[in-house]
Amino acid sequence: MSMNAIQFQRGLSLAQFQAQYGSEPQCERALVAARWPQGFRCAHCGCKRYFLTRNGQGRQLWECFLCGYQSSSIAGTVMEHTKLPLTVWFVAMYLMTQHKGGISALALKRHLGVSYKSAWLLKHKLMQTMAQHDASYRLQGRVEIDDAYLGGERAGHINGGRKAANKSAFVAAVQTRPDGRPLYVHLTPVADFTNQDMRQWAQQHLAPGCHVVSDGTRAFAQVCQAQATHERYVTGGGRQGAQTPQLRWVNTVLGNLKTSLAGTYHSFDHAKYAGRYLAEFAYRFNRRFDLPAMLPRLLKALATTAALPLKVIRGSEASS
């Protein structure tokens, strides 16, 4: 049996991480380079000239030469108002990108030496950034899709419908390469698998001209409303349905997702936060071809994503 080159590729080792991001100045320089790759530009007037100064907490500030507006490297980003050192953020990014199965907020608390509240908030800001960063991509070419659920007795298939206790519906979609192997995945929460919900999902997540392969769920025919062609297989439920060769990769992804969530999280409020946990899994999957680059790419997303208000991040306590 040949070795899977993707699975056995070199990641970003702990020694390499420490060498690149082991101190606060190193993290600051990396963040500044990610936020202003062409050099500082004032957010108020666009001026490129500035003075360097520091605030009362010792954080470096860029003061615009023209209008006097002061900005730190984290102002206007997801990290705005954080009281945690940048090194803590970078360790969290390292753990969330280099661990295949992810890491819970409780485990982050122990690794980072911060309170559970801080670890939970940091993790959810990172997950929300991942979700927003991938949301605009539309799947192309051949796409396998399936209806799936979080919670309940069976997480992968319909069992009493969406309204069954403790179940949240989502669409699993996998874009495959010309050689048939998976390339990109979308895991998107939906209200239900109705014609209206699937039509809206298809218009948002499918590029015109793609070819969709699905099981017998009737609402999936709505992908044609997004100018996609549709190939349907009535597979039935259980093991037989999961072994349908035309839907091999979407079922494989769902199996890996279930294993990842069960092995990492004791529980979480999927009714509120399913989108983020699904996005975290998808973010790592979609960038699995280059593990060392995953952290700098997430840093770039953090540096260019607008600040996330607390009310957006935290609707209630989570139990992850």
Image (tube, rainbow, N blue to C red):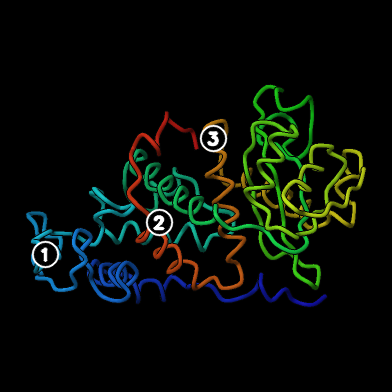
**Three-letter code for the amino acid on which mark 1 is drawn:** Glu
> Residue 301, position in %: x, y?
42, 61
Q: Are marks 3 and 2 in contact (CB under 8 Å)?
A: no
What residue do we see at 82% from left, 54% from top? 229
Q: Are marks 1 and 2 in contact (CB under 8 Å)?
A: no
Q: Is residue 300 left or right of residue 165?
A: left
Residue 92 marker: 2
**Three-letter code for the amino acid on which mark 2 is drawn:** Ala
Q: Secondary structure at mark 2?
A: helix
Nearer to us in this view, 16 or 227:
227
**Residue at which label 3 appears:** 268
Mark 3 closeness class: few <14, some 14–19, many ≥20 residues within 10 Å: some
Mark 3 → mark 1, Cα distance in angstroms? 43 Å
For the residues carrying marks 3 and 1, which lies nearer the camera in this image?
1
1 or 2: tag closer to the N-terminus: 1
Mark 2 closeness class: few <14, some 14–19, many ≥20 residues within 10 Å: many
**Residue at which label 1 appears:** 63
